[in-house]
Each structure stands twice: as C-alpha cells, then as structure tokens.
Amino acid sequence: MTATTATAPVERAACYHCGARVPQDAPWTITLDDAEHPLCCPGCEAVAHAIVDGGLAGYYRFRSELPTRPDERRTAQAETWALFDDPGLQRRFVHADDEGVHATLAVEGITCAACAWLIEHRLNALDGVSASAVDLTHHRVRVAWDPQRIAFSRLLAELAAIGYPAQPYEPDEAQRRLQREERRQVRRLIVAGVGMMQVAMFSIPFYVAGDGGLGADFDTLFHWLAFALTTPVVLYSAQPFFAGARRDLRNRQLGMDVPVSLAIAGAYLASTWALLVGHGDVYFDSAAMFTFFLLFGRFLEVRARRRSGRRGNALTEILPLSAIRLGEHGEERLLPASELVAGDRVLVRPGHGVPADGVIEQGASSLDESMLTGEALPVTRGVGDTVTGGSHNVESPLTVRVTHAGRDARAARLLDLTDRAFAERPPVARRAARLAHHFVIQVLLIAAATGWVWSFVDPERAFWVTLSVLVVSCPCALALATPAALTAAHGRLYRRGVLLTRADALETLPRLDRMIFDKTGTLTQGEMRLERTVPLAEHDPERLTALAAALEAHSEHPIARAFRPHRRAGISARDVTARPGLGLAGEIDGRPWRLGRPDFAAPDRVPTNPDSGAEIGHWLLLAEDGEPRAWFALGDQPREDAATTVAALAARGIAVELLSGDAEGPTRALAERLGIAEWRAGASPEDKLARLRDCQAEGQRVAMVGDGINDIPVLAGADIAFAMNAATDLARTRADAVLLGPHLGRLVEALDVGRATRRIIRQNLGWALAYNLLALPPAALGWVPPWLAALGMSASSLVVVANALRLARQRRAENTLAREAS
C-alpha cells in the first residue's frame, strides 16, 4: 500500500483494519503482501482474516475510507458489562469466601468437554482469577477472583471474546434460555430428519440401479434435488458444529467439532463439485445422514444429562417467589420473597412453600422437606421448631419468624456448595479430557495418512474413505465417558440426601480404608433428653422436674430443651442467673434454687452421684437453699440407623473408629452398643487431628464425619469429610459432602455409588477406546461407508451415556443394611 491511496495513513501503532490505536504488545496481526500488519482487537482480526482468506484482499488496496470498527457492538456490550461492577447489583450474585469472591455464570455456546477446557484455561490465565470450573450439564461456570486485581466486567468480556457470551446465573432466565436452546435443537433436528429422508429417497435408486444408472436426465434431476434438500441441512442444522469448529480454531484448540465439521463440509462440498463438473461420486445422502445422526445423538445425550441433573436445578427454584409478611397488628402484605429480612414475620398457608428459614411462633403442621433432605414422609413441626425455606406446608397455617432469607437461606447456601463441587475438576475427569484432546489430533493425522495412501491405491475413493475415518473415529464417546458418569452420580446422591460439595469426593470414596466418627450430633441425635429423675428423701419427682424446668426456661443452652416438655403453668422462676459451666440460680416461690454441677448447687453438702448407668452422659443436681433435692440424668440417644450403618461399613471393608470429647463412660457405652472396637474419649480437636495424621501416615485413606466447630480441623485434614445435616455453617463449608437428612445410612450409599461410578467410568473409557480402535481399521480399509460410520459414531456416544445413567437406577443401600448387619 502506498501513500497515494485514499486510505488514511496507517502508522505502526494504528490498526490496519480500522485505524484505531493498537494496544502495546497486542498479539493480533494479519499478513498481506508478505508483510505483517498490526490489529487492535479480536474483532478486527476475525474480520480481516475473513476478508483475506476469502480472496478479497484487494479490498485493502482499493478502499477509500476506513470501515466502522467491528467491535463497536462489543464496546456497547462492554458498557453493559460495566453495570455488573456496581456493588449494589453484585450483592445479588457475587459471594465472598476466604480467598476473595466468586460467582456462578450462565454460559452460552458450550457443546463439549473441549469448550469447558477452553473456557477454564482462558479465565485461569487472567491475572486475578484464582479458579474457574465449568458445569457441562447445566452450562454454568463458577469463577473465583480477586476484585482488587480484576473487575467482574472483564470476565464477561473475555468470555464473549472467545465466543461464549455469559451473564450472572439467574434460575428463571437460565431455565428460559435452556428452553429456547432446546427448541432450536428440535427445529434443527426436524430439518435434518426431513432432509435426510427426502435425500435418501432420491439416492436409493442409484444404489439399486447398478452401474447403468437411471439415465442422464434422471441422474441430473435427482442429484440437483438432493443438493437442494441437503443445503439447508448443512447450512442450518449443522451450524452448531461449524460455529464450534470456528471457535476452536480461532482459539488454537482442537475440539470434537473440528473433525465433525470437516466431515460434513467435505462431503457436501465434494458432492457439489462433482455435480457442477459432471463427474465424480455424489454423497449428499451421507452428509445429510451424518448431520442428522450427530444432532440426534447430541440431542438425546443433552436430554439425558439434563434429566439426571434436573434435581440439582430444582434446588435453585425451591424458594417461593412471593411471601405473606405480617405487620405489627397482624395485617397481611404480599411481597416478593427476595425482600424478606431477618426478623420479619410471615404467614405460611397450607399448600404454600416456606419462603425463608425461620422459627415457628404460632401453629403446628406437617412439612414436606423432601426437596432438601430426600425424606419422602412429612415431618411434624410446632411452636419453637425451626423450619427451612423451600419446605412445603401440608396441613395448617403457620406463623414463622424469619431468621435467614434470600442468599442466607439454607437452600441458597446448598446451591452455592453445589456449584463449588465443580470448582476443581477431579483428576479422572482431567485425564479423560486430555486423552480426548490428544485423540482428536491423532484422528486428524490418521485421516490425513489414510487419504494420502488411498490417493495412490484408488484416487476416486480416497476422499470418501478419509471421510469415513474422520466420522467413525470421532472421540465424542471418549469425551463423554467421565462427565456423564460424574453427572449421573451427583444427581443420584443428591436425590438420596447426600450433597457433594467438592468434585474429587467421588474419586476418593471408592478408595477409603477408615471412617472416623464424632459422637455428639453425629452417631447420636445431638439432643439431650431427660433419662432419669432420682429424688432425694420424700419428694414428688414430677414437681421437682417442673422446678428444674422453670429454671431452665430462662436458658438457651441445649440442656434446656430436655426440660421443655416438663414445664408447668403454675411454676415459674424469677431473677434467674446463669453461671457458665456451672448451672442456673433463681427464686421459685420466694426460695433460692440452684440446678447444675453438684459443687455449684450444694457446695457444702454434695451427695453421692447415683451413677448406675455408664451410658448416661450428664448428671445435674437440684438444690433448695443448699439442700440437695434431686438428681437428673441427661443422655443423648444414638441415631436409629447408627448400628446398622457401622455394621454395613465393616461389611464393606471399612474400619470404623469413634473419637469423642465426651467422658469415658458414655463414650465406651456408645461404642459397645454400636459395635465399634476402636474408640477414644476426652479427645480434643488436636488429638483428633493427630490421630487422623497417624492413620494417613500408615497409608490409609480416612473419612471424617462430624458436625461441630470443634470438628473443623479434622474435617479439613481428612481425605474426605462429611458434615451432618445439622452441622454448623463453618463445618459444612469445610466438608466435601453434606448429609441433607439425619440418616447415617446415606454414608453407605455414598460409598456404594462412589464404587459404582469408578466402575462405570472404567467401562465407558474401555468401551470408547475399544470402539475407536476396532472401528478405525475397517474404515481405513474402505469397508465402512460414510453413512454407516455416522451411525456407529452416534451409537457409541449413546451407549456411553446410557451406561452412565445406570447410576441413577442403583439399588438403594439402606434396603440391605439390616441384612448385612445380621
């Protein structure tokens, strides 16, 4: 280009396409007339290459003015993305954690594991991004970043730049987007199916007519009709494959769409050329058939994966959209549930969902909590009981005082833990993705070598044999082998009440050697109960219990709940003071009473402790003005399925151990009752962690099951950590899995599903590799026509998905616990 042209002078720092300033160290260039010219952005690069590669390089030599920048629309989008940097807006979808902040994005354009790989590597390469992971099933990406180093809008811009527009995940909008995408898939499938059948109708006569053909006129007519019917199939139905291939090549990656697009485009263009020049083979039917089978296989695969993940999606929609808030005088106001705050009083009518976590202030009813806990039967809740947002009121109206609403509700926190499960892809998934990526390269090399050999053996068949090799060896099944199994296993466990919060948990489960249990709240129910009342001298035990209940009515300690059923309306305490670690002191009917440790209740006259049952955990003494009146024994009952769970774990070769901070008597009694041979009482958090480290040093893989803050160190150090359904928030965030219900038998089922997942992943990988290795030689020898190659490739992918979905039909573990324990 010379200075005499009408084009504005292009300086070294100006974009060759649009004239804008080129950022320093920008990587975008275009080579023209043996010279390399700088470009300012990916948009200009894409347009410039399209112009030059399309044979229109003369445009740059004869243009009279600079064009409109191709990224002006992207600039407008960037202004829209900047809105997401608003702190008020970010409070809806950006959540803080220990290392910064994170958010879940809904991403468009994801088709296979290669897309996930590209998105993750692009985001992880950005300065300030600590982690990102794609959920292939739901087309979501969870990204964590440092807001001081990178803006949220930059993440959205980077995803759009590589062809994957994204926005903060919102369940309603995401559901509508999935429905639109599914409708587009159905339309493309219908066009491909109709086109394939009609093209086959015009192609079958050629196969049955033999070498003589149908006559020149009929040959030409049928070929042109096949061309007309195949064109919309290739240009419309196959468009997702071409778009994916362009995106992969633009980002210098080789995904599954590359060989697929080469096969479809090659068959269509070669057949069109043969039709135009009047000689050569025409295989429009193979192009249409290949497109239809691919679309049909992908459609069934996506439907199956979405169905297996539908339970996880339902979690995002579990909270009602509206709520009835009660005013100070009981007036009702209907408002969006998102506007509720802690302290609000809401009315939950029968048939309605509970809009937030809270405590029942008035009424009693049955609540269906199956969506959260997996329990099929409703549970009874009354005044003072906690209710979980998303549970369904069955019988009577309830007045609930909100404790946690919106993003703080338990259902929302569970969703965040679910998204975190994909923050780190398990090693087995990473290995499978790398294997599929390398296999694509090998397929392209093998296809090229096959074409070169056949160009000498039979040049007329060289292209079609190469096409069959490309189609039959496409590693779609290999790429689906692991993600399909992991998705089905996650859905299966969630339906049974086990929420996996870390992706590598499923890989660790089958290799466990030992499971360590905490005692209180884990093997036991975590609720103190009054087991015995031992009156001293001639006193009414029921009245003494009511006196103790009157004192405990002023306490929030867990012990107070044990006395709640024994309160009497005519007995109340005044001036009650709590002495931490000692007990309660107050006045009843003008007399001083104390309840608690013996040396606190009656310091001068401590009676003998009637410790007749080692399994009883706590003895409290009630004293009137220093005179002992009664002993109260409090205990914590084991969970109903604790013994059968321990026996089932032992039957599966898992060593079971109990580590408790409780006294030796109750700990020994519980261990003997449940059949646990290894136990330790009085263990501090440091002692528990040291024991865990000793087991790991011996080469054992150890699981820890706990529920309290004191269990956090050992939960963090375990190979896999389980948090109970009533665990503290801090314990849940440190755990690899959360039990949504109170049943310990879910641990056995998690172990069985983990072992089944490992087995099915191995089966899927073995099948995918065996299919590709067995199908490749016949295709290279010319024995497999293109249409049969398309059918075989689609069938192999469906076999992998169907095998993975067997995980959803595994026999429930608790059905066999009793038999295995006997």
Image (cartoon, rainbow, N blue to C red):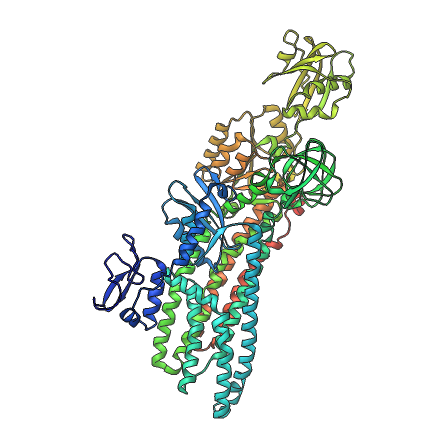
Query: Does 637 sit left or right of 467 as displayed?
Result: right
Residue at image coords 49%, 92%: 217
Of the pair 70 and 605, the residue shown nearer to us: 70
Residue at image coords 76%, 11%: 537
Q: Residue 505: where, in percent of width, then height? A: 51, 45
> Is 597 above or below relative to 163?
above
Residue 612 appearing in the image: no
Residue at image coords 39%, 58%: 72
Quick one: which residue is furthest to the left in this view? 3
Residue 636 appearing in the image: yes
Q: Quadrant of residue 335?
A: top right
* Quadrant for the N terminus in the image: bottom left
Query: Does 21 sit left or right of 587 as displayed?
Result: left
Q: Quadrant of residue 62?
A: bottom left
Q: Residue 760: where, in percent of width, then height? A: 53, 56
Of the pair 341 and 635, the residue shown nearer to us: 341
Of the pair 162 and 694, the residue shown nearer to us: 162
* Quadrant for the C terminus in the image: top right
Residue at image coords 46%, 47%: 83
Q: Residue 480: where, in percent of width, then height? A: 49, 59
